[in-house]
């Protein structure tokens, strides 16, 4: 069992930056693929970014490519999402997710992930 706890959300002006963190419990974190999803009110949960267990594969939604950067520190059981040039349309609850091995690619479907955090709210004002 893996528990995920997100932090780092908040209110920021358009053009600003935030860094989200997700700390995982369990000694097998380093073998899990990790991802960030987000869900805005009235919308479906959508893939934002994902990273393989060795950080040799990363994927980004087109809407965040070039603005967001995903990374992980397996020694700290933590995955990060650095968000820059934030836009009002980035406003959403952001969720961390973990996928058990084997992981052959960075999955984009939420159904492919086995564990979820409770989410952290990001609000970008115009």
Image (cartoon, rainbow, N blue to C red):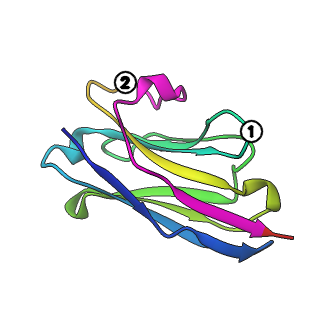
The count of marks equals 2
Look at the image and tell me whether residue 47 can be seen. yes
Location of mark 2 (residue): 104
Q: Secondary structure at mark 1?
A: loop
Drawn side of residue 125 relative to residue 69, left or right: right
Q: Residue furthest right?
A: 126
Does residue 110 lie above or below 52 as drawn?
above
| Front residue of 58 and 27 | 27
Judged by depth in the image, the label closer to the viewer, 2 or 1, is 1
Q: Residue at x 38, y 47 (%)?
A: 55
Residue 50 x/y as whole percent: 49, 42
Quadrant where the C terminus sits is bottom right
Graded by Cα atoms within 10 Å as few (under 14), some (14 to 19) or many (20 or more), the crowding at tag 2 reads few
CA distance separating discs 2 and 1? 32 Å
Which region of the structure is painted magenta?
104-124
Asked if residue 33 is among those painted magenta in the image, a careful observer would answer: no
Taking the magenta stretch, the answer to whether it contains residue 116 is: yes
Q: Return the x and y of residue 81 as percentages of the image width and height.
A: 51, 59
Q: Secondary structure at mark 2?
A: loop
Residue sitting at x 15%, y 49%: 26
Residue 17 shows in this picture: no
Residue 101 placement (x, y as % from top left): 26, 28
Residue linked to disc 1: 42
Mark seen at residue 26: none
Q: At 53% from the left edge and 69% from the top edge, which residue is drawn? A: 19
Does residue 122 lie above or below 24 as drawn?
A: below
Determine the image quadrant of residue 103.
top left
């Amino acid at each position: 069992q893996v528990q995920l706890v997100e932090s780092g959300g908040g209110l920021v002006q358009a053009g600003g930056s935030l860094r989200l963190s997700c700390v995982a419990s369990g000694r097998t974190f380093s073998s899990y693929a990790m991802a960030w999803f987000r869900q805005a009110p009235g919308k479906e949960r959508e893939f934002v970014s994902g990273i393989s267990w060795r950080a040799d594969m990363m994927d980004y939604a087109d809407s965040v490519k070039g603005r967001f950067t995903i990374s992980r520190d397996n020694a700290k059981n933590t995955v990060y999402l650095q968000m820059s040039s934030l836009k009002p349309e980035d406003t959403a609850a952001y969720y961390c997710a973990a996928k058990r091995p084997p992981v052959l690619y960075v999955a984009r479907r939420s159904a492919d992930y086995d564990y979820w955090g409770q989410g952290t709210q990001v609000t970008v004002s115009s």
